[in-house]
Amino acid sequence: MQLSRRSVLFAAFAASSTAALAACGSSDSSSSTGTGAAGAVDGKGKTLTVLVAAQPNYPTQFAAWSKQVTDAFTAATGATLAIETFSNSAEETTKIQASIVAGTGPDVYQLGTTFTPVAYGTGGFLELSADDWKAIGGREKFSPETFGMSGPSEDKQIGIPSATRPFVYAYNTEMFTAAGIASPPTTWNDLIAAATKLTSDGTYGMAVAYADGYDPWKYIWAFTEQTGGSYVSEDLTKAQLDSEQVKNAVAQYFGLLTQHKVVDPAAVGWKSGDALAAFSGGKAAILPMTSAAAVPALDQGAVKGKYAFAPLPDVAPGQTSRPAGAPPAQSIVSGDNLAIASYTPNKDLALAYVKLVTDAEIQQAQFTYFGNLPTNKEALAAVTSANPVLAPMAAAEKGSTPTAFTGAWADVQNGVQNVVVQSLPELAKGSVDPASTASLLEAANAKAQASLDRAAR
Amino acid sequence: MTVPPALAAPEAAADAAPREPGPRRAARPTSGRRGRRFPGGRPLWLMLPTLLLLVLVIVVPFLLAVWIGFLDLDQYTLRQLFSAPFIGLKNYSEGFAAGQLLHSIWISAAFSVLTTAFCLPVGLLAALAVNSAFRGRGLVRSAFLIPYVIPSFVTAMVWRFLMRPDGAFNDFLAVFGITGGQWLIGEQAFWALVIVDTWAAWPFIYMMTTAGMQAIPDELYEAAALDGAGWVARIRHVVLPGIRHQLLLGLLLSTLAHFNNFTLPYVLLGSPAPDAALTLPVNIFQTSFQFFRFGLGSAMSVISLVLLMIPAIYYLRASKLTAAPGED
C-alpha cells in the first residue's frame, strides 16, 4: 500500500512536470506592439526580453545598470524589461540556436563583433531599414568606425553598435622616461627597439600572451593587413592563410620572443591575464593588445599612476611604411553589437530599447559601470574629455579595421589560432621552423576555404 | 600458509547464506484477481509517467541527434531544421576523413584508460587504509572525498594556475630534482590532463571499493586471521574477491566518465587545444559551437555514444545485469 501511494505521488509529479515542460514550449507572443501617433511606443502589459553578457567582475555595477535601464525603459514605453544573461559565447550560441529553431526567445541579443557575421548567416536577425535606424535615433549618433561589423553592406546591417573596445598598448611611463624614450612609438620597429632597450635584469620589454585563446590571431591579423595581405580575399571567396604575408606575420609574431628576445620565455604559456599581471607588476614595460577593460587591474598594481595607453603601431615589424592600399589595422573593430531577433513580435519595443541603451546617457553610464567605451559620438567625446588617459583609445578606434564579414570567420580565426597553439612547443625551445608553420597554415587554409565555400553556396 | 576453503571461494559462502527476498521472488506471477490486473504481479502501468519523461528527455533528443547527423545543418540552414539538406552518411565520412575524429577517439581512449589505471591503485589503497576502525577515521574519509566534490571547473582553474611554468606543481617536482616545464602546451598537455583528472577522480574508485568492503562479513576476516592469513593474503583472498563486482562497476563508470569529460580539458587547456590533448568531447564542442557544423557535430556525438556503449554492454552482459528472470 505504501509503495502504491509513493508510485501514485510520483506519477502525479511526473505528470505535472510533463505538463510544465509542455507549457514551457508556448509563450505569449501573440500581439504586436502599438506605436503612438507621435512615434512613442505604447508597450503597456508587454514584456521585452533581452539577452546580454553577464558581468561577473562587476556584479554590483551590473545590478545598478540593470535597474537604471529597466526603469528608464518602463518610463519610456510602459513595458516591462526582462534582462537575461549569458556567461560565455557557447551559452549564447546555444540560446540563439534554440531560439532560432523554435522561433521564440529573447527579442534582442548582445553579440560580439566577430560573432555578428555568424549570427547574420543564420538569417535569424532583423536587417535594419532606414525607418528602423530613424527609430533608434539615426546613424549619425554613432561613431562611423563602429559600423564595421554591423553587416556585409550598409543596407544589410543587423548589428547596432553598443560598446567598443579598441585594442591599444599600455606602457610604463616611468620606465620609458628612465630609458629616455620621449614619446610612445608608432611603428612596430620602433616599439621593438624600445622594448629591446627596456629588457634587462629580469624585466622584459613586452608582455605577450602566446597561449591566450584570442590575442595571437589579432597580432598576426594586424601584421598581415599592414603588409597588404588579408586572411580572406576582398570578395570573401578565397582563404589566404597560406599567403606570404600571413607566413611572414606569424614569423614576426614569434620573432618577438625568438629573434628580438623582448618577451619573457615563460610567456609561451601565458594567457592574457598573465601578460596583464606581468605588466601591472612592473615586470614588463609594454603591454600590447590591451583595452580599457585593463584599467581596474592596472590601478590595483604596482604601475598605478605610472602607465599610459597609446594606439598600436600601424606599420608592421620589419617595414618602414605600409604598402599602398594597406589599412592601418591598429585594432580590429572590437566590441558589442545589439541585434533584434526577426521572430520578435515586439519590434517597436526592441527598437525603443536599442535607442535607450545607445543614447548618450546610458552609454556614459555603461562606461562608468563596466569601462566599455561608448559607440555614441556624444558620449565618447564626454568620456574621453573627462578621462584623458582614454584619448588614445578613441584614436585607436579611428584606426581600427574590420575583420572579414563572413560566416566562415570562425574557421579562419580558429585556424590561425590553432597554428600558434600547435607551434608553442617549438617556441618554448627557442625557435620555430617556418616550414612547420607553413604546413600548419596550409592545413588551416584548406579548412577555411571549405568553410568559405559553404558560406558562398 | 593455507587458506580456509570458505575464504578460497567466498561466493560459495555467500550462496550458503539465507537469501534476502529479491526481485526474482517478487517477480513471480500472482494468481487471482490481482494477477489479472497486474501481469506478472507488478503494476507496470505506474511506470508510464516515468517512461514518458524518459522518452521526452532521452529518447527524443537522441533520435533528433541521430537525425541531425544525416543533415547538412549549420548556421546557414539552422532555421530550416527539419528541411535542411539530407546528406546521408556524408557527415560521418567527413568526420573520419577530415575532422580529426580518429585522432580524438584515440586521445580520449588513452586518456580515460590511463586515468582509470592510475586511479585504481590510489583509490584501492585509500579504501584499505580506512577500512579498519581508528580514531579520526570519519574525518579522513571525508577529507578523501574533497577532490571529488570540487566542481570540475574549479579543479581545472586551480590546476591551470598550479601548472604554470613558475607554479607550485613545478616547485613540488623540483624538490625531487624534476624539471616540470610547460605543462599546458604540446605533448605535456596530455599528461597534465591525466594528472589532474587522476587527482580529481580517484575518490570515486575509493568510494566504490569502500562500499564493497563494507559488505564483506567480519566473519571472513576473523576466519582468515584464525588461519594465520597475513595482510597480503587477506587482501588477495578476502577483499579482492569480495569487492570484485563493485570494483569492476567502478572501473567501467570511471572510464566512461573520463572519456566523456569535457569541462576539465576545455577549462584547463582552452580551445583550440594542443593536438596531443584534443579529446573527443572538446572536438565535438569545437565542431558544433565554434565552427557551427551542427550536423557534423551530431554525427560525431553518435559515434562517441556507440563507442561508449561497447564497454557498457560488455560489462552488463558479463555481470548478467541484463539477464531476464529465470536466466543465469
Image: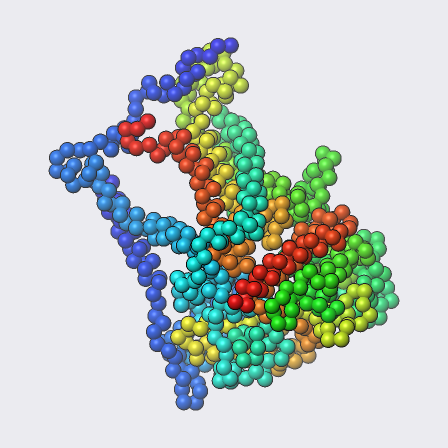
Residue B263 position (above or below residue B109) = below
Residue A257, picture quadrant: bottom right
Is B218 rendered above or below residue B191? Answer: above
Front position in the image: A297 or B10:
B10
Identify the residue at image location x=47%, y=18%.
B237
Asked if residue A60 shows in the view, the reply is no
Residue at 40% x, 15% y is B6
Q: Nearer the viewer, residue A14 or B117?
A: B117
* Residue A170: x %, y % from top left: 73, 66
The location of residue B207, given as percent across then percent down, is: 47, 34
- Farthest residue toward the bottom? A38
- The quadrant in which residue A214 appears is bottom right
Spot occupied by residue A263 in the image (x, y as percentages of width and height): 77, 56
Horizontal arrangement in the rendering, residue B52 relative to residue A83 (left or right):
left
Q: Is residue B280 visible?
A: yes
Indicate left or right for B289 with B324 as reference: right
Residue under the image location 41 percent in, 89 percent down: A37
Image coordinates of residue B230 in percent, x first then y, are 52, 15
Residue B48 shown left or right of residue B272 in the figure: left
Considering every residue shown, the one lying at the far right of the view is A180
Residue B316's place in the image compared with A35, above or below, is: above
